[in-house]
Image (cartoon, rainbow, N blue to C red):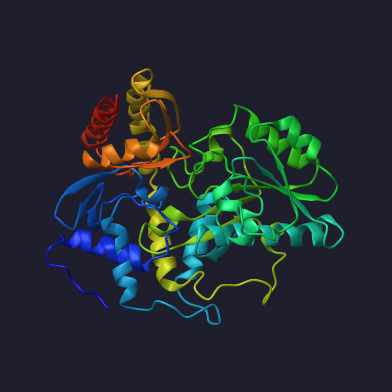
Amino acid sequence: MITMDQTLTHASQLLRLEDEHVAHNYHPLDVVVSGGQGAVLTDTEGQQYLDFLSAYSANNFGHRHPTLVAAAKEQLDRLTLTSRAFHHDQLAPFADGLATLIGKDMVLPMNTGAEAVESAIKVARKWGYEVKGVPDGRALIIVATGNFHGRTTTIISFSDDPLAHDHFGPYTPGFVTVPYGDLEALHEAITDDVVAVLLEPIQGESGVQIPPVGYLAGVRELTRQHRMLLIADEIQSGLARTGRTLACEHEDVTADVYLLGKALGGGIVPVSAVVADHDVLGVLQPGQHGSTFGGNPLACAVGLAVIRLLETGEYQARATRLGTQLRDRLDRMVGHGVIAVRSRGLWAGVDVDPRLGTGRDVCEVLARRHVLAKDTHGSTMRLAPPLVISEDQLHHGLDQLELALADLS
């Protein structure tokens, strides 16, 4: 029951209640958001902030994009859930649109990114047994150091992040880890039992780590040679964030399986998908995998509206154009509180000089300057403004970052 202390602000009361009643599995900045539009968030006191995180790329199209909100409202007035026990009129258009956009045949609709990863693991193992001919129970999947694919028990079994991994065992077997970006190590790890290589084309949680030029193409060639599936986790990097529909396109690489999520739900509902051809997803038969909410009418209606936005190419072009400006500004900060920058499109990892403090320290100062971003792994910050951000908003946010760094100097 909510009881209010008249001596505290509304935000303070909400923070106190959250601390008491919500599990402490996150450490948010002390800003209580109550509204948003485009690239701007508003707190409970009416103060406005620029969003430079986009809910880890789930809000690629900004907050309350009118086209997406309209699609959701229209569907809310018609039908929201049937389960997959019955057909509904939104699933086929969504699957057809997404398959066409990605260049594959089939879509397995799910809800969260982690569900898409778990689904792909199941599909890859089944494909390995029934198509490749690996003896049952022996399938291996190669993954990379620094990976982040979610926080379910199976997925954290192959994480090397102590926060995600430690004290959650016993762990799920069947994974081999090699250094990210090291083709030779990947080659040496291949055996007849390997059914797939699961990689992020760009590692987001690790600080927007971009592999060496030619790495993804080399992985693609090795997987072809050894009859393994290449599974590209594009849950953060996909859907225009890097300036292309898929980050793999920067190296002209076509994966066997794509994992999508976050932005696919338009910041309105959780929507994810495994996208592949018939020869891969066709191994699933009725009863072997499912989700009550996966592919629900509301999710499909919003997801289809997202697909229609992406089909225009406008957001890919904006991410490319504004991403160049983002990188130019960040490069000028190197030597002035910043040690290194990695970016692609409107997505950047910024390594702050540890003498100034942690990434969290910078984000807290930046929040006081009304720009919201997120730290990761010590002194690294991630910047991912919505693709709808204006040039003026982008540069204002970067001005505030420069001032925040100066504040800490």
Q: Nearer the viewer, residue 37 or 312?
A: 37
Location of residue 4 by image quarter: bottom left
Q: Nearer the viewer, residue 357 or 149?
A: 357
Location of residue 154 by image quarter: bottom right
Q: Does residue 320 show up?
A: yes
Image quadrant containing the C terminus: top left
Q: Nearer the viewer, residue 272 or 98?
A: 272
71 lies left or right of 159: left
Q: Position of residue 280 (x, y in %)?
A: 70, 58
Q: Position of residue 47 (x, y in %)?
A: 15, 50
Q: Position of residue 160 (x, y in %)?
A: 62, 45
Q: Does residue 71 show up?
A: no
Location of residue 252 by image quarter: top right
228 lies left or right of 408: right
Q: Residue at x 62, y 56 (%)?
A: 155
Image quadrant containing the N terminus: bottom left
195 lies left or right of 143: right
Q: Position of residue 359 (x, y in %)?
A: 39, 36
Q: Is residue 343 above or below residue 14?
A: above
Q: Is residue 309 above or below residue 240?
A: below
Q: Residue at x 69, y 73 (%)?
A: 288
Q: Residue at x 81, y 60 (%)?
A: 129
